[in-house]
Amino acid sequence: MIKKLFTFLWPWPIRRRLLHKWFGYNIAKDAKIGWSWIFPDQLIMESGSRIGHLNVAVHLDCVELKANAKIGRSNWITGFSTKAQSKHFEYQKNRQSKLYLGEHAAVTKQHHLDCTNVINIGEFATIAGYSSQFLTHSIDVYENRQSSAPITIGAYTFVSTNVVVLGGAVLPDFSVLGAKALLNKTFTEEWTLYGGVPAKAVRAIDKTAKYFSRPVGFVY
């Protein structure tokens, strides 16, 4: 804890070197972390990736940002490390507590990501708006034990504001999840708008929509 606090207090160029030396993190020279408490067991940030201010990422096996991926500000990213001394999830031998963002993917601000299991956000995907919850774990009332399942958000997807996404859910590539939706299962049909509680296919998306072919993640 002392090393973490000491590291946190330095300006970024010095902080980056300390994160490499003391924690073994792999952070590209042009990647950057703002004033945020980011201390997973493993951190990988490729060229051009960014983590903004006032984020917290703790109790995770890994956070990985591919090139030009971005996490905005004030996001709460938690997990349950496989190194934890606990009986929780012992039966899930292959579980990994990880957040993965593909190239040019973005998480905006004020979201809660529970990475007890893997949250995989595909390239050029956007977790937009505010106050969305991604919850990979819950209690299995039939087995009376903690249970977890991964969440997959496909490439070139758009996730609108204030949604809830539960463990085991899949949003397929080239699709949109509407505001305030509950995504609680696997969908496979691409080029589709999903919405509602629980979410269902609402209508097809025209393949000429420019969001789904943009060459850079940032939307002007």
Image (tube, rainbow, N blue to C red):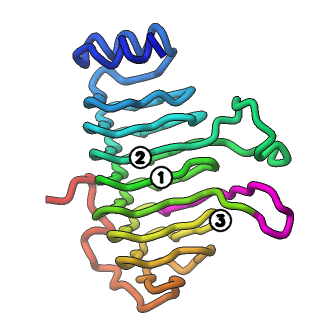
Q: Quadrant of residue 57?
A: top left
Which sits in the foreground, 141 or 83?
Answer: 141
Label 2 and label 3: CA atoms lie apart by: 20 Å
Start and end of the magenta stretch? 140-154
Q: Residue at point 27% right, 77% down? A: 209
- State which tag comes first along the sequence, 1 or 2: 2
Q: Is residue 141 left or right of residue 48?
A: right
Q: Is residue 168 left or right of residue 180?
A: right
Mark 1 closeness class: few <14, some 14–19, many ≥20 residues within 10 Å: many
Residue where numbered disc 2 is placed: 76
Nearest-to-viewer mark from 3 and 1: 1
**Disc number for residue 113:** 1
Q: Residue at point 30% right, 62% down? A: 130
- State which tag comes first along the sequence, 3 or 1: 1
Task: In the rendered view, tell whether residue 99 sits above or below residue 46.
Answer: below
Residue where numbered disc 3 is placed: 168
Q: Position of residue 107 (x, y in %)?
A: 35, 52
Nearest-to-viewer mark from 2 and 3: 2
Q: Position of residue 46 (x, y in %)?
A: 39, 31
Label 3 and label 1: CA atoms lie apart by: 14 Å
Mark 1–mark 2 CB contact (< 8 Å): yes
